Amino acid sequence: MELWLLNHLSTALLAVLVVGGFVLLAVAGSLIATRWHPALNDGENNDMVGVVLGMFGAIYGIILAFVIVNLWTELQDTQKVVATEATALSQIVRDAQAFPPDTRAAVNATVRDYVHTVVEKQWPLMKAGHGDYTATGEKVDGMYRVLSGFEPQTQSEQAFYAKALDSLNDVVAQRRNRIAESRDQLPVLLQVLIVGGAVVIILLTLLYGIRSRRVRLLFVGSVAALIGFSLLLVVVLDRPFAGDLNVSPKPFKESSLAQFW
């Protein structure tokens, strides 16, 4: 459900649904609570509710801040992984310039097949949370076969051949990291804690008594909007390859790899 929403709805529309939904539920809950229990408007329990709300708010805020910062860091790390993989492929293409024409053409052909498979086949799978290794496994084996079948004759060819092999090993390592990041998500218990904490905070705001209905609704709605926006960030950042704020395959179309498009 989360991935479907991210891949089919814009971030702006998601913000309206999530933030607006929290605000509407909180405001409706406040109106119902005061109608059923008019004594809440008197604020007789404000001292106790204020202490509990402050304590829960502080704990929940720390947890939520930690999760958001961690997810943002992981998003940046995933972007670096993709850039590093693409850079290593570009380096293979550059190193192949020192090889004989036939070998150079074979290397370029295998790299071209790999980048097209990554962008056109593997990327949609990662957006849907189904990243696997089979889509590009044969392409990686093809690059290894081409390089392993080449016997460098000169010192220059030997030097560039060694660099090309090192770059190919980097591609394999970063490919594994990229696919692992596409599968990764917050643990279920942490998701329950985040959503459950949001519900508890909003319920506590309903118990805080304010005589003015307008001020009360503004108070409840503001807290709900803040929590809703924070949860929206968690949802958007938790899936680095889905939604509008995603990791782009653009590095696989730049630099020396641009010739294959």
Image (spheres, rainbow, N blue to C red):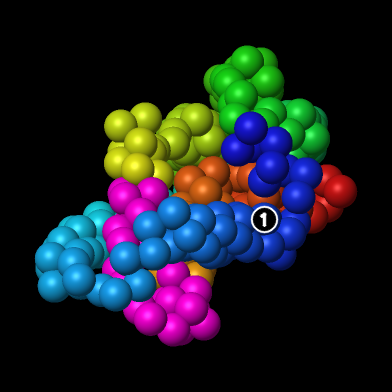
| Residue 215 sits inside the magenta stretch | yes
Q: Which residue is mark 1?
A: 17
Q: Quadrant of residue 195?
A: top left
Q: Is residue 259 visible?
A: yes
Instruction: Provide residue 32's location: percent of width, then percent of height.
Output: 50, 56
What kind of element bears circle 1?
helix
Q: Is residue 250 above or below residue 136?
A: below
Question: What residue lies at 51% left-to-right and 82% top-to-bottom?
Answer: 214
Magenta span contains residue 206: yes
Q: Position of residue 238 (x, y in %)?
A: 48, 46
* Vertical position of residue 58 compared to residue 87: above or below: below
Which of 232/160 is in front? Answer: 232
Q: Which residue does the image show at 83% across and 46% down from the upper left?
A: 260
> Is 75 on the left-hand or right-hand side of 59?
right
Front-lying residue, 222 or 31 = 31
Question: In front: 56, or 65?
Answer: 56
In the rendered image, the quadrant that contains the N terminus is: top right
Foreground pick, 252 / 168: 252
Left or right side of 77 for 12: right
Give the residues in magenta. Answer: 197-220
Q: Where is residue 35 shown, x and y percent of the image?
A: 48, 60
Q: Is residue 70 above or below residue 41?
A: above
212 on left or right of 89: left
